Image (cartoon, coloured by chain):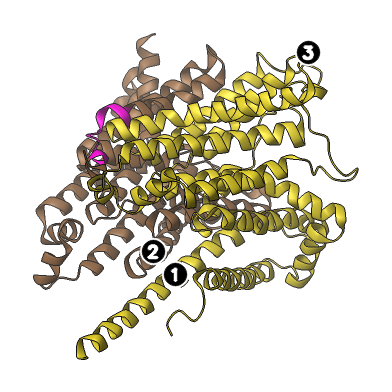
């Protein structure tokens, strides 16, 4: 493989890592508040759909903010059930995922499929840095990425700071680890869990918008393709630590980028399997197996 | 006083209320998108129940949903979240088609062989997440979901390349041997004997759950693995057996669809039977007989939705929206009921303390 091919692979990795890293970063905030959100897949899908629809009518940034907004509403609904009504998070999460699939296809058919792959959809602004432009390898790795690609590492750092360096972060983590202690200290664990759910929703909305306006410029049915669960896997393996979780997500993105490349050489089905296999192997052999404890013995 | 109504009739009542609320919300969705809900719903009802053969078709569509719902319920009941029914069903169906192609096997034996293979393959596919969960503590939600994609892609490869029937444009296997087929019992419907196999499975799981040690252990482990370990149950063992039975049921469901309905395996075999199975198990609270009932209602919605789409402009995906709305409404009802139950029992304890 030539140097340029590797550079292109790395560039694709950055684009593909963005949605998973974003969702995982939002999800780990929720994870620290004691809510393992299995609805991220559905949030992202609705986000991707909304982003394309609004971008078609009102431009890319309306699309991005609309996606974040709608996911905030969905995560409020999720929190209402999981935090206040004490419903089973698994049940609500899965219902939300299936709801998202059904609703987006339903609406695509109501609005007409033409809108969702129209050239009128405005993508998220792409950044070209002139300094890299003259070196083909650097150009392939670092140029022509959507703003969201560069925003993502910044958001990871901010989230890490928020969780570990601020009173808000301490309260949020306490709402998952020791809610009663937090209540005793006069802070509402419920409010913290709501805040965490909203942060998770916002991140998933942005992740969805990147998927449909940054990585691609269209909406396809079920286009999230399990990325919400890859994010969940990254959180479990990274134990909710922001940087570690982001790095695991990056590993999945390498597998995805590689799977696009090797499609020329092997049957596409095997190529497409690669990210899923890597995810299974990573969760199986890199997570600490916390669940064993709950089973006893 | 408090238990004026039996839990079963309470559950049926809340299910009925949830259906009505979901239909009402669905009517709003239909109106918002510019169609007449009454027209849409009556078209749906007519196409799902309008005549004998339509009822049989709905029952035929119930069959595979019973199997995936039952599969999910067995795992959920034992506290292991197998969301891999979709993948287990795909591989079961594909394996069934391959065995179904074999020549020279006597009719009844061939069907049994095909179905046994389907169940076995589904079980093997569930073995992987089951072992990872019980040996390594790996989160089974992530693993089973990823394995769905892997299974679907694997089957897609098989049916696009080595086992493809070149005579047709859509990637699918050749028709299975007549000896491996169950014939349709009505000239206008695809209804067939597999429906009764599904009912037998419901009865068997209901029996296991209520009358056997295995079933008791599944329930205890699902409720509280640590306490059940103290009580001498091996939680890991119970979880693994539940996972295997769960995978076998989903795989068998795929095999039944091949043997009874489609008589071949094709790419994009399932429109989400496994995912719908999750919802069915959740709504039925893992009760096998409840699964059969809920599967019928869900099949009604899906069959009706297809007819509705043909008669009106309302897309069939409305059924997915309605089914998930039922789950939301039921979850809300159950939480409220639990909350009311708590305050009542607190009152009761208070009164007892006073006396």
- Residue displayed at 47% across by 42% down: B83
Question: Which residue shows up at 79% across the image and 33% down it?
Answer: B182
The alpha-carbon separation of the residues under discs 1 and 2 comes to: 8 Å
Residue density around tag 2, few if under 14, some if 14–19, many if 20 or more, within 10 Å:
many
In the image, which disc is placed on residue A87?
2
What is the distance, in whole Å, between disc 3 and disc 1 at their CAs?
54 Å
In the rendered image, is residue B7 in sight?
yes
Asked if residue B75 is positioned above or below residue B166 in the image, the reply reads below
Magenta segment, principal secondary structure? helix
Residue B299 falls left or right of residue A42: right
Question: Which residue in the protein does label 1 denote?
Answer: B334
Chain B shade in the render: yellow
Q: Chain of mark 2?
A: A
Q: Earlier in the sequence, mark 3 or mark 1?
A: 3
Of labels 3 and 1, the one closer to you: 3
* Image x and y of residue B23, in percent: 64, 69
Q: Which residue is mark 3?
A: B104
Please provide the residue range marked out in magenta: A282-292
Residue A288 located within the stretch drawn in magenta:
yes
Q: Are marks 3 and 2 on the same chain?
A: no
The stretch drawn in magenta includes residue A283: yes
- The residue drawn where x is 30% and y is 57% is A199
Q: Secondary structure at mark 3?
A: loop
Image mark 3: chain: B
Query: Residue B293 location, x and y as percent?
Result: 63, 58
Task: Tell me the shade of chain A.
Answer: brown
Q: Nearer the viewer, mark 1 or mark 2?
A: 1
């Amino acid at each position: 493989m030539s140097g340029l091919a590797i550079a292109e692979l790395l560039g694709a990795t950055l684009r593909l890592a963005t949605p998973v890293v974003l969702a995982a970063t939002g999800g780990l905030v929720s994870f620290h508040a004691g809510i393992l959100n299995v609805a991220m897949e559905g949030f992202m899908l609705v986000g991707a759909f909304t982003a394309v629809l609004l971008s078609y009518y009102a431009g890319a940034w309306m699309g991005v903010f609309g996606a974040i907004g709608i996911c905030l509403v969905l995560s409020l609904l999720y929190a209402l059930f999981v935090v206040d009504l004490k419903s089973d998070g698994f049940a609500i999460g899965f219902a939300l995922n299936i709801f998202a699939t059904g609703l987006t296809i339903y609406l695509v058919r109501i609005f007409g499929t033409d809108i969702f792959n129209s050239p009128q959809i405005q993508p998220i602004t792409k950044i070209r840095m002139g300094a890299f432009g003259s070196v083909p390898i650097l150009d392939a790795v670092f140029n022509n990425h959507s703003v969201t690609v560069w925003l993502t590492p910044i958001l990871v750092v901010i989230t890490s700071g928020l969780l570990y360096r601020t009173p808000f972060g301490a309260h949020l983590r306490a709402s998952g680890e020791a809610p009663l202690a937090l209540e005793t200290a006069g802070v509402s664990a419920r409010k913290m869990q709501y805040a965490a759910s909203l942060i998770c929703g916002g991140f998933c909305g942005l992740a969805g918008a990147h998927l449909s306006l940054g990585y691609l410029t269209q909406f396809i049915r079920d286009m999230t393709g399990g990325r919400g669960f890859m994010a969940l896997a990254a959180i479990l393996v990274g134990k909710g630590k922001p940087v570690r979780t982001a790095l695991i997500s990056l590993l999945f993105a390498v597998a995805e980028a590689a799977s696009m490349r090797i499609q020329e050489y092997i049957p596409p089905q095997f190529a497409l399997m690669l990210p899923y296999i890597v995810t299974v192997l990573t969760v199986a052999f890199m997570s600490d197996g916390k669940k064993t404890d709950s089973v006893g013995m | 006083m408090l238990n004026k109504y039996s839990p079963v009739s309470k559950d049926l009542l809340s299910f009925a209320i949830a259906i009505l609320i979901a239909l009402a919300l669905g009517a709003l969705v239909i109106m918002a998108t510019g169609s007449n809900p009454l027209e849409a719903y009556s078209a749906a009802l007519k196409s799902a129940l309008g005549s004998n053969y339509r009822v049989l078709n709905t029952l035929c569509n119930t069959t595979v949903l019973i199997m995936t719902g039952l599969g999910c319920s067995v795992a959920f009941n034992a506290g292991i979240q197998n969301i891999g029914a979709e993948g287990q069903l795909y591989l079961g169906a594909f394996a069934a088609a391959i065995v179904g192609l074999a020549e020279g096997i006597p009719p009844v034996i061939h069907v049994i062989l095909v179905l046994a293979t389907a169940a076995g393959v589904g079980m093997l596919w569930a073995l992987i997440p089951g072992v990872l969960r019980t040996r390594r503590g790996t989160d089974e939600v992530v693993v089973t979901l990823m394995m769905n994609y892997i299974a679907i892609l694997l089957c897609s490869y098989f049916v696009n390349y080595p086992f493809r029937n070149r005579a047709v444009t859509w990637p699918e296997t050749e028709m299975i041997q007549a000896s491996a087929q169950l014939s349709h019992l009505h000239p206008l419907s695809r209804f067939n004997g597999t429906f009764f196999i599904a009912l037998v499975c419901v009865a068997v799981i209901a029996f296991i759950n209520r009358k056997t040690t295995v079933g008791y252990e599944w329930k205890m482990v699902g409720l509280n693995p640590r306490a059940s370990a103290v009580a001498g149950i091996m939680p890991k063992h119970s979880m693994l057996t539940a996972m295997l039975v769960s995978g076998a049921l989903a795989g068998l469901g795929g095999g039944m669809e091949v043997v009874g309905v489609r008589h071949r395996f094709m790419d994009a075999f399932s429109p989400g039977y496994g995912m719908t199975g999750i919802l069915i198990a959740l709504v039925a609270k893992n009760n096998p007989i409840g699964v059969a009932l809920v599967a019928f209602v869900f099949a009604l919605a899906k069959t009706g939705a297809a007819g509705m789409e043909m008669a009106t402009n309302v897309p069939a995906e409305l059924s997915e929206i309605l089914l998930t709305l039922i789950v939301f409404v039921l979850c809300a009802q159950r939480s409220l009921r639990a909350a009311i139950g708590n305050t009542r029992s607190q009152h009761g304890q208070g009164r007892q303390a006073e006396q």
